[in-house]
Amino acid sequence: MRQFDCPQCSAPVPFETPGAVFAVCGHCQSMVVRRDTELEAIGKMADLPPDHTPLQIGARGVCGSRRFRLLGRLRVGWDDGFWNEWYADFGDGKNGWVAESQGFFLISEAAPGPPNLLAKSETLGSGKRLEIEGTDYAVTDVKKARVVAGEGELPFVARPYDEWVSIDLTGPGRKFASIERQNGEVRLHLGESAQPEDIAWEGLRPVPGWKGEPVPVEKNRTEAIPCPECGGVITTRATGVTLSLVCGHCGTLVNMTAAGDRAVVAQKIKASQKLERPMLPLGKRGTLRGIEWEVIGALSRKDAYSQWNEFLLYNPWHGFLWLTEWAGHWNLVRRVLESPPSFGDATHFQGKVYKLFARESAKVTQVAGEFYWRVRVGEKAVIADYIAPPHMLSSETYEELNETTWSAGEYISANEVASAFGVKLIETPTGVFANQPNPWTTRWPTLKKYALYAVVVLLGIQLLSLGGSNRQVVLDQSFNFQQPAPGTTAAPLVTPSFELRGKQSPARVKAYAEVNNAWLGLDADLVNETTGQTYPAPVTVQYYHGYDDGPWKEGKQDAATDLPAVPPGRYHLALTPEADPSIKSLPFQIRIERGGVFWSNFFLCLLGIAIWPIWAFFRHHAFEAKRWSQSDYSPYPSSTSDE
């Protein structure tokens, strides 16, 4: 590190990297340029506006395998916002930038641009694509940026109000690119985006009003902004990132200047356009998923079919989070910088396939609190929602701003929201929301496991039964049927006695007769000679055949009746035969077998096991049909359900 004396106040001005040629004196705000071994003062740098960023010069961070230390800051503004660019030392003689914007960090280094990058950049607009170093990037934002203020050391001379065109691009995963076009020159930076929790920080500064830190009153650093319309005091909760506020006294919507030190009237909204008494009160703090958040903004939007509410949450170390509510259904939503690829009516994001659910033009109808962009009543955006329940992926295209943003949401229960913020939510969920979890989907893994267990047990029982189920013939007897005289019945027939041994088991009564286009019926009873217990076992043998546009046949010349669970004992079979009138005399055979397994019982048990999974399948289908009944992209031909 080399240290120089400020030409204006003689205070030490450190230059820690060889690439730094410009710095701001921390004592007198002089802008100095390094000329080899001397410094030249070129004017005064504007004061940095107050903000709640926990970052400061000297802070260290680790993101994946990349380590860095912050050396200087550039406050960058544009017509609709501002952000911080931190100049960083990445080690091994490498330097780059850590941009802090809307709760994201963009970590990048200078890179050589592809051929004709300057000419290509002049044709880029939101949604256009550009290949850089073999990676396909999508343009998400094009704007004219300018220097607002700065501190520490920087790799170039940054005078207040210097302007350039800034083009942001995103690639697959978290790849990020930035193109800056200024005075006929073009600069390219490549890197990656990161959520606040992706970076392990050391040396951050305390943030007033958070983690028990007192809120100091400093000269020229107040967080209270006078309303330019009524003079009432507007207190900002996300100082340094807030761009739009609604005055709590007169309801005027005001915008912060690029310096962040005063407000100007943006829109005089009507009383009906001010969101009164939002479900989550402004200033309310709550803990969601282990992180404390403060509600700083609320708005309502509507499209051609419905209206919903959105609540902006803020934490200095974790950025911004959204809670959205429709008909009592809630989603936890966070912006993402990736631009997912589109495949017809679907898109891919982080290993999941999302299906297009809705695409509508929506507008802001009511506002309250503060926001990190210049919101206005009537602001329009084309919103496309893709779902992979319980997750949702949404794009918002602002044609007037030449900008497209993406956000990822996750369904969250109303009870969790109410518990987190200690409020009572009046509206209970109605209907099925786009990404609401299907309860039958979540139950299926458990249901499938127990159904599989039951099938395995049933198969085991059946196999064990088959092992000892050999049928034994206990009677094989021949009889002759004689057609009785008209008006009489055939004489009853009785088999010889036989023994059914062993334990209680099935018995089969089987009959065989050479019937031909005729039938033989046997009204049979198996009789226990000891107890008198009778087991009906009627058997009918019938066989027909012929020719009618081809040969056909029906029935067989044998038939059987199975009797389950017949106790052991001595039995005989009593028969009363009856036959087709065409039969005058017919020999037939009776066989009685002991043992065997009834497969019909097995299949009945299998059907019983399948009833619940089948029911779950139909309930799952009904739930999905009701979900997609609200979509213009439904895969279901009809969407009715009483779920």
Image (spheres, rainbow, N blue to C red):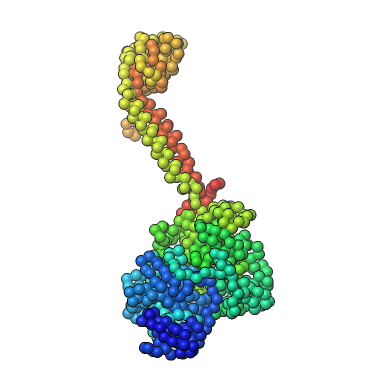
Residue at 39% from the left image edge and 29% from the top image edge = 600
In the rendered image, which quarter is residue 419 located in?
Answer: bottom right
Residue 564 appears in the picture as rendered: yes
Residue at 52% from the left image edge and 51% from the top image edge = 626
Q: Position of residue 225 (x, y in %)?
A: 62, 76
Toward the viewer: 209 or 548? 209
Q: Position of residue 251 (x, y in %)?
A: 66, 71
In the rendered image, which quarter is residue 115 located in?
Answer: bottom left
Residue at 41% from the left image edge and 17% from the top image edge = 567
In which quadrant of the rendered image does the N terminus lie?
Answer: bottom left
Residue at 34% from the left image edge and 18% from the top image edge = 593
Q: Position of residue 344 (x, y in %)?
A: 41, 62
Residue 359 appears in the picture as rendered: no
Q: Is residue 544 above or below residue 263?
A: above
Q: Is residue 514 above or below residue 632?
A: above
Q: Position of residue 508 (x, y in %)?
A: 37, 20
Q: Is residue 474 above or below residue 265?
A: above
How many marks can you see? 0
Toward the viewer: 575 or 565? 565
Q: Is residue 279 left or right of residue 541?
A: right
Q: Is residue 587 left or right of residue 47?
A: left
Toward the viewer: 415 or 319? 319
Toward the viewer: 74 or 384? 74
